[in-house]
Structure formats: C-alpha cells, structure tokens
Image (cartoon, rainbow, N blue to C red):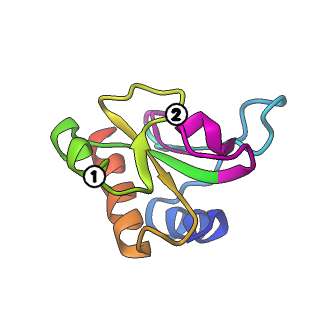
Amino acid sequence: MDRNSIFSYTKRTYNTDPSYPWAKFSNYAVLRHESNNKWYGLLMKVDKNKLKLDGDEQIEILNVKCDPALASILRENSSIFPAYHMNKEHWISIVLDGSVEDEEILHLLDTSYELTK
C-alpha cells in the first residue's frame, strides 16, 4: 500500500483530504477528522535509523492511533513500531513497504479514525 492508495481510501471512506502543515517537512501528510480536526493518521518519510532499523535511507510510514494492548501485540511484527515522534503507548508506525497487508493497514486506519472521533 502506498500513500496515494491511502489518500484515495480516506477520501472515499471519510471524505478526508490530506493536509501538509509544515513547510520544512513538505512530505508529511496529516489525515484529520472533518468535524473536529483531530488527527487519525500521519504519513511521512523518515530515515530508517529513526525506527532503530539498519541504514539511513528513507522509508514511508503511516502513524495511526491504536489501543495500547493491541499495539503491544502488533509491535511483534517486524514492520510495526512504536510511533515515530508521537505518543508511543497509543500510536504505532507502520512501514509502507508491502510487508504489512493492505487489509490490515486499512483496518488499523479505520480503528484510528474511530478512536479519535
């Protein structure tokens, strides 16, 4: 799953367009609720070493809110991490490199949307 597929899904499902609030980080896209402006997703490219992975090339990640108990289980997956630059108990980072199934990514995005209503 890539960022364009996620944007297409969130537009179709939640009528959400991404916003880009930081000029310095122009590739960071925030997904917000239309009604309350709360975030339910953040897409960004970060250096692998920010997630304690080997290498310094950039990878695309999606941060979503998650129940802490589920988050601890999900982090056993080698492509799901404590959220980069967010509350690590309630948010996770999903690496968007094809190692997490699209259905699971969309389910976690839907869960995040519900948790942030």
Residue 19 place in picture, x, y as percent: 68, 43
Residue 61 place in picture, x, y as percent: 57, 51
Q: Is residue 112 left or right of residue 42?
A: left
Residue at 52 percent of width and 59 percent of height: 15
Residue at 34 percent of width and 68 percent of height: 104
Q: Quadrant of residue 85?
A: top right
Q: Is residue 37 left or right of residue 88?
A: right
Residue 63 place in picture, x, y as percent: 48, 44
Could you tell me which secondary element the residue under label 2 belongs to? Answer: loop
Q: Amino acid at mark 2?
A: Tyr
Is residue 46 in view from this perspective?
A: yes
* Above or below: residue 105 compared with residue 95: below
Return the residue at label 1. Answer: 74
Q: Is residue 57 magenta?
A: yes
**Residue closest to the far front:** 54
Depth check: give the residue in front, 114 or 88: 88
Q: Quadrant of residue 67?
A: top left
Q: Which residues are magenta?
A: 36-59
Cβ atoms under marks 1 and 2 closer than 8 Å: no
Return the residue at label 2. Answer: 84
Crowding at mark 1 (Cα within 10 Å: few <14, some 14-19, many 20+): some
Numbered label attached to residue 9: none
* Marks 1 and 2, the one that precedes in the sequence: 1
Crowding at mark 2 (Cα within 10 Å: few <14, some 14-19, many 20+): some
Is residue 44 in view from this perspective?
A: no
Quadrant where the image shows the N terminus: bottom right
Q: CA distance from mark 1 to mark 2?
A: 15 Å
